[in-house]
């Protein structure tokens, strides 16, 4: 078989199900744990193997969230085009995200908190922080529970929740693009991409330069999502090229990891999205690692489990040991999350399709193909 010349051909070569995206989700979620292993122990090791380990995790971490959002934008665009209605698409996304997120929030507040808090049970359950923590269910992020992880270098229960509001904003942006017809009219989609780049990246850098931080903030995450979405929408026109991938990686490295451009991460969304999609479209043989989609559970549960390891094993407060101890625990929980929560929830998709059938029978509605 000849090498695909476009992103669309690469998709068709794997029947629109390349395993590369599945492997990438696993690697990125494990990368998040690797990066957090440095953050959560305080990373005071600066020499020897520990210092080298911490240095590598620090360099790695800046790409993780942008790649996650770019990957999500590309795959979600495909899901949108396959859906029959926009409400049905949003309901399916909710079904994929909300159940595991809700369980993680309840387990943190009702199990992890009471077990490890420095407070008495009575004081814990009376504290306003306990009740406010459930606001995470509606995207209003709360990071702390009463008396939990007070002796750790950081007291956050699940710092990874910072991305949730921006994930919701991505779906709002996508819905607006679809409802206004700009997704279908690709010329308008280019205008949207350029406008978001100017407002969220260029203007943001001029107005709010931050020379001490070159990571990915919320606007960069959204820009990466939109870049991934645009790559899918123009998939038949965009080359699938190893050389272009290498150029995208090089540009991303120069702008993000070298102090050439202030806040260079804000200008690398499209290159990051391209090399993420290129790697995701690779199609290596599937194995037991892909018996379920465990990446979301790893991503969700990793931070609180790592925090618990920091508290329970003070003699092992190094990035290396935090990673090695946390990973097996997180993977086991992620496997249970997939088979007991996420997969059964996705098994209810037929209810959404039935609702769509009833809705369409009553009145004509716009579909993703027409908006």
Image: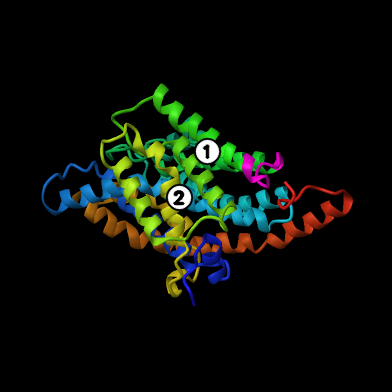
Q: Main secondary structure of the magenta part?
A: loop
Kindly indicate whether the residue at mark 2 contacts the one at mark 1 (C-beta within 8 angstroms). Answer: no
The answer to whether residue 268 shows anywhere in this view is yes
Camera-side residue of 169 and 177: 177
Residue labelled with disc 1? 165
User: Which contiguous range is marked in magenta?
Assistant: 179-188
Residue 112 visible somewhere in the drawing: no
Q: Residues within 10 Å of mark 1 (few under 14, many from 20)?
A: some
Sequence order check: which comes first, mark 1 or mark 2?
1
Which quadrant of the view contains residue 62?
top left
What mark, if any, has residue 273 been given in the picture? 2
Q: Any magenta on residue 158?
A: no
Picture residue at 28% right of the left edge, 40% below the top: 152
Q: How is the image coloured?
A: rainbow
**Residue found 37% across the figure and 41% down from its top:** 117
Farthest bottom residue in view: 1
Q: Nearer the viewer, residue 58 or 177?
A: 177
| The residue positioned farthest toward the left in the image shown | 48
Q: Is residue 183 magenta?
A: yes
Image x and y of residue 109, in percent? 47, 44
Residue 55's place in the image compared with 334, above or below, is above
Quick check: 117 left or right of 131?
A: left
Q: CA distance from mark 1 to mark 2?
A: 20 Å
């Amino acid at each position: 078989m000849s090498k695909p010349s476009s992103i669309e051909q690469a998709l068709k070569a794997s029947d629109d199900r390349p395993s590369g995206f599945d492997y990438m989700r696993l690697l990125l979620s494990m990368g998040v744990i690797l990066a957090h292993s440095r953050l959560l122990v305080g990373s005071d090791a600066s020499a020897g193997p520990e210092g080298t380990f911490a240095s590598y995790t620090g360099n790695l971490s800046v790409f993780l969230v942008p790649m996650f959002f770019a990957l999500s934008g590309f795959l979600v665009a495909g899901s949108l085009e396959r859906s029959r209605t926009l409400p049905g698409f949003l309901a399916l996304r909710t079904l994929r995200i909300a159940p595991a997120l809700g369980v993680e929030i309840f387990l943190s507040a009702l199990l992890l908190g009471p077990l490890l808090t420095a407070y008495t049970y009575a004081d814990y359950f009376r504290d306003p922080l306990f009740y406010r923590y459930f606001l995470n269910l509606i995207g209003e992020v709360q990071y702390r529970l009463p008396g939990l992880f007070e002796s750790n270098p950081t007291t956050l229960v699940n710092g990874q929740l910072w991305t949730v509001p921006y994930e919701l904003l991505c779906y709002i942006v996508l819905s607006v693009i679809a409802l206004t017809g700009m997704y279908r009219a690709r010329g308008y989609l280019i205008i949207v991409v350029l406008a978001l780049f100017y407002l969220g990246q260029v203007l943001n850098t001029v107005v709010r330069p931050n020379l001490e931080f070159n990571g990915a903030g919320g606007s960069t995450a959204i820009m990466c999502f939109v870049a991934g979405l645009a790559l899918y929408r123009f998939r038949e026109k965009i080359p699938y090229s190893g050389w272009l991938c290498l150029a995208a990686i090089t540009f991303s490295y120069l702008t993000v990891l070298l102090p050439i451009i202030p806040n260079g991460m804000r200008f690398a969304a499209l290159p990051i999205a391209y090399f993420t999609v290129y790697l995701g479209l690779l199609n290596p043989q599937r194995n037991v690692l892909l018996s379920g989609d465990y990446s979301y559970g790893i991503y969700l549960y990793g931070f609180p489990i790592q925090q618990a390891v920091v508290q329970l094993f003070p003699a092992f407060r190094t990035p290396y040991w935090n990673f090695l101890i946390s990973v097996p625990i997180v993977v086991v929980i992620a496997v249970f999350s997939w088979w007991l929560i996420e997969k059964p929830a996705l098994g209810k998709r037929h209810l959404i399709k039935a609702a769509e059938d009833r809705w369409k029978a009553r009145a004509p509605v716009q579909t993703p193909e027409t908006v």
